[in-house]
Image (cartoon, rainbow, N blue to C red):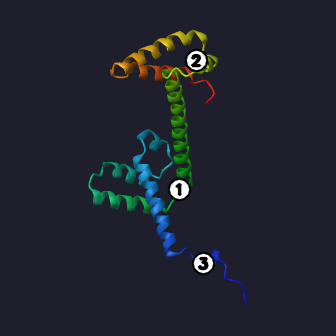
């Protein structure tokens, strides 16, 4: 019997074409959701940029759907890989920021819980002159928490830890 036909010679199936189209429409939706400064930084053809900007102004559901389809159609004509790379880089920056904020939240929680060793570990990461003001913020935050007041000191502690740990290696 002969070998099976080579799949590379066949055109994409109808299902594959639909997946590709849906993927481009999703990419267009991501472009519509981008902050303006980040959208301006992307190398988009003028017609795609105009369609994305129009998509931001549309409020009607049906019109949004039509605009999504139109943006997907426009994206079929261009190489979208640079756009995907830029969006992935943006997503990675967001993930790193979120991880960093979780680390800072962990430090705040450890200090608020008076975890053994937390102050010693923190002392190795921040200048010694900063420990006393941090202790005062922790005391204020605990007092606020105990009296059910808004967590102003806890937020201030978070901001101060974020500043101090900005240069420290992630934990």
Q: Distance between the residues labelled 2 and 3?
A: 65 Å
Residue pictured at 50% horizontal, 14% vertical: 134
Residue pictured at 49% horizontal, 19% vertical: 160
Label 1, secondary structure: give it. Answer: loop
Residue 124: quadrant of the picture: top right
Badge 1 density bin: few <14, some 14–19, many ≥20, Cα 10 Å: some
Residue 61: quadrant of the picture: bottom left
N-term-proximal mark, 3 vs 1: 3
Q: Position of residue 143 (x, y in %)?
A: 39, 16
Figure quadrant of the C terminus: top right
Figure quadrant of the N terminus: bottom right
Residue pictured at 55% horizontal, 31% vertical: 103
Q: Mark 2 points at which residue?
A: 119
Q: Could you say which disc has been placed on residue 18 in the image?
A: none
Label 2, secondary structure: give it. Answer: helix
Q: Name the residue under label 1.
A: 80
Q: Name the residue under label 3.
A: 10
Q: Is residue 166 above or below residue 53?
A: above
Q: Nearer the viewer, mark 2 or mark 1?
A: 2
N-term-proximal mark, 2 vs 3: 3
Q: Position of residue 95 (x, y in %)?
A: 53, 40
Residue pictured at 47% horizontal, 60% vertical: 24
Label 3, secondary structure: give it. Answer: loop
Q: Distance between the residues labelled 2 and 1?
A: 49 Å
């Amino acid at each position: 019997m002969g070998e099976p036909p080579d799949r590379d010679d066949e055109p994409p199936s109808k299902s594959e074409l639909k997946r590709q189209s849906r993927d481009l429409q999703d990419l267009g939706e991501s472009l519509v959701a981008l902050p303006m400064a980040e959208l301006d930084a992307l190398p988009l053809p003028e017609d795609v940029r105009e369609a994305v900007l129009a998509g931001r102004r549309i409020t009607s559901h049906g019109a949004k759907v039509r605009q999504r389809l139109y943006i997907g159609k426009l994206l079929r004509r261009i190489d979208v890989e640079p756009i995907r790379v830029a969006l992935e880089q943006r997503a990675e920056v967001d993930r790193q920021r979120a991880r960093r904020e979780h680390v800072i939240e962990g430090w705040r929680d450890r200090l608020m819980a008076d975890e053994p060793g937390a102050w010693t570990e923190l002392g190795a990461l921040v200048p010694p002159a900063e420990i006393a003001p941090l202790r005062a913020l922790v005391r204020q935050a605990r007092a606020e928490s105990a009296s059910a007041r808004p967590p102003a000191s806890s937020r201030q502690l978070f901001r101060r830890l974020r500043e101090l740990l900005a240069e420290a290696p992630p934990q």
